Amino acid sequence: MARVTLENLAKWYGGQNVLDIVSIDVKEGEFLTLLGPSGCGKTTTLRMVAGFVSPDTGRVLFNGTDMTRTPTQKRRLGMVFQDYALFPHLNVADNVGFALRAAGMPKADISKRVRELLALIRLPAVGERFPSELSGGQQQRVAIARALAHTPAVLLMDEPLGALDLKLREAMQHELAVIQQKLGITTIYVTHDQEEALSLSNRIALMRRGKIEQLGTPREIYRNPATPFAAFFLGKINFVPGKLQEKQAGAYRISTSKGMLLCPTKDERKFSLGDQVLVAVRPEHLRIAEVASQNGSNVLPGRVVRQKFTGKVVQYEVRVDEMTSFIVDGTMDRSIESDAPVQVAWDVSATYLYPYEDDQEIGVGVASTEPQVVEVTGKHEANTLSESLAMT
């Protein structure tokens, strides 16, 4: 195991700053995920750890030793990629033991190590098969076994489950977690899939535009997103623009186009009267009522314009005004007809407050007539529920 320190890493390509002063301390045995959209710098960061890309500034250290200019083959790394990269002309046992043979390990020791690794990935009987005879999930497990064969200090994984279907991907997430916990190997994992990041990671480094947007445990980032983008990318979120009208004991009063909303003052940010702000709330904290009932909650009137059956819940799109719609997770035991007038309510304590951002990437301030609805699910992003429905 190794402690990996990324110290002020930066990289430019053709005058474009693709990595902008990134610093992370990855603990021994930790599973750290670099999460973010395409082009955010996560793969560039991983390639710097691997030694494939040299930083223009900054250092990469393993256990305090500067490895920035050390060749890849001398870093004691295991690497797994989306395309598996198994040798088609070699059987599974020979694929797993390839690096060991190249290192001159005795045949008996190689055979023993290969058997141990095939048992670890729960494929003890496939040693004589060829990659073409395996399923996608089995091939990925063999690729993991091969990466672990020489007992690496650090395991690097770049979108390893991206080519698998949903069910297989979920099963492999479990397998990965079990293997990593069993071995206690320091792992740096790259993905744009929020569910993978939430289920696998000890910590997540959420990246955006070459920088670390937020670093923390999955629970910390999901429950306390530091920025609108963090709230947007990790989970689902609804935004309502408004203006800070008044401060009172324990809460801010925010004026919006549809009335006053309350936000708790627990946030460490300093807001002033008159500030333009974003009120945010997650769909699972919302509830739909057909009659108004304040009861210490925020309430906005709206109208159901669409519903989406997901298998677990019914998601409603509720139009609040011409430029704002909400996604609400409803229960399976009731159905609300389209065009029905409703009240969208949520507890004040479940409300987030951010400085206003005119940012199309998170669906705010879009210069169009489409209502602003934000939903992020797995690998796709939808600005409206209509788009989400079209993609299913």
Image: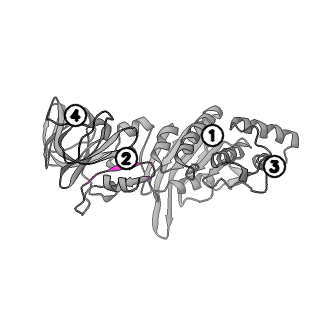
Left or right side of 101 for 262: left
Report if residue 376 lies within the magenta region. yes
* C-alpha gap between disc 1 and disc 4: 44 Å
Say which of marks 3 and 4 sits in front: 4
Disc on res. 101: none
- Residue 325 in the image: state x and y as whole percent: 24, 50
- Which residues are the magenta region? 372-379
Q: Amino acid at mark 2?
A: Ala
Q: Give whichever of discs 3 and 4 has the lower sequence position.
A: 3
Q: Amino acid at mark 4?
A: Val
Residue at image mark 1: 2
Q: Which one is in front, 136 or 19?
A: 136
Which numbered dot is residue 230? Answer: 2
Snapshot quadrant of residue 331: top left
Q: Residue at x 17, y 45 (%)?
A: 302
Look at the magenta stretch and give its main secondary structure: loop
Disc on the earlier residue, 4 or 2: 2
Mark 3 in CB contact with mark 2 (< 8 angstroms): no
Find residue 310 and report its horizontal and vertical position in percent.
Answer: 39, 43
105 is within the stretch colored magenta: no
Left/right of residue 172 with respect to residue 110 in the rendered view? left
Q: Residues within 10 Å of mark 3 (few under 14, many from 20)?
A: few
The residues bearing labels 1 and 3 have C-alpha atoms spaced at a distance of: 21 Å
Secondary-structure class at tag 4: helix
**Which residue occupies the extreme bottom position in the image?**
14
